[in-house]
Image (tube, rainbow, N blue to C red):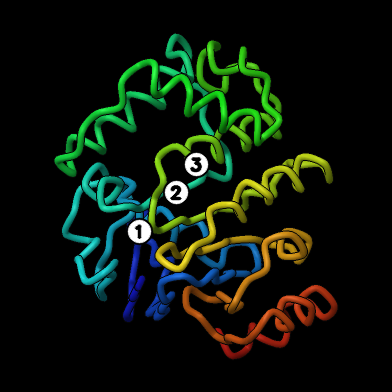
Amino acid sequence: MLKINNLHVSVADKPILKGLTLEVPAGEVHAVMGPNGAGKSTLGYSLSGRPGYEVTDGSASWNGRDLLDLDPAERAAAGLFLSFQYPIEIPGVPAMTFIRTALNAQKRARGEEEVSAPAFLKLVKAASQSLKMDFDMLKRPLNVGFSGGEKKRMEILQMALLEPSLLILDETDSGLDIDALRIVADGVNAMRSPERSMLVITHYQRLLDYIKPDRVHVLAGGRIVASGGPELALELEAEGYDKFLPEAA
């Protein structure tokens, strides 16, 4: 279970999260929706340990481990994966080299046997086919010259190969057309399992048409101000966030 209690986070001395409390049980998919500037991406960055995001109060744990006490690499080895809203380009580093290095680094940290080059090649070919990716993309520098949809597929490919137990998807639908959205969503849905939890951060209901959440939360003013079932996302799509803003204030 992901358990966040009274989390306060500041960026450049500006408070962003202001007492956020949230629980995501194992096996469930929870969506976090909210207006611009509410703190949705800050939540993902804070849980993953991005520098510059200062936790000033509260706690966050995953399967009983204190996430905030771990450095980013340790959080990744513990099973946390963050899919970026805007994946960065890394010139000079082939995507396949990047992913295998990350995978084996995590396996070493957990005391597991590393994946050999032939075994990894077999894994990555199967994963790329399921995401309808051109295998030659993996020989190119990571995300360099990729379209928005290709970058998001590369994120999902990494997720499939790393097999995290806690997935945080930060506006994965951003920049995707309908076909790319469906393919990416299929890749995410293939990861659903009783042992794996997902936190899906999004502005729009359309992503949730493909990735069906168990619970939907409204983040406004730096905290969760409402929670409900999938019907809450439909209500937000129809009526907007205005009714929740006074409560956030």
Can you say whether 160 is above or below 222 in the image?
Answer: above
Q: Residues within 10 Å of mark 2 (few under 14, many from 20)?
A: some
Image quadrant where one finds the N terminus:
bottom left
Residues at discs 3 and 1 in contact (Cβ within 8 Å): no
The mark that comes first in sequence, 3 or 2, is 2
Question: Which quarter of the picture shows residue 25?
Answer: bottom left
Task: Point out residue 10 in the picture as x, y percentages from the top left corner.
Answer: 35, 62
Q: Which of labels 3 and 1 is toward the front?
A: 3
Residues at discs 3 and 2 in contact (Cβ within 8 Å): no
Residues at discs 1 and 2 in contact (Cβ within 8 Å): yes
Task: Point out residue 19 in the picture as x, y percentages from the top left corner.
Answer: 37, 80
The CA span between labels 3 and 2 is 12 Å
What amino acid type is highlighted by mark number 2? Leu
Q: Is disc 2 placed on a helix, strand or loop? A: strand
What amino acid type is highlighted by mark number 3? Ala
Q: Which of labels 1 and 2 is toward the front?
A: 2
Q: Is residue 240 left or right of residue 138?
A: right
Camera-side residue of 169 and 11 = 169
Task: Name the residue carrying label 3.
Answer: 160
Task: Name the residue carrying label 1.
Answer: 47
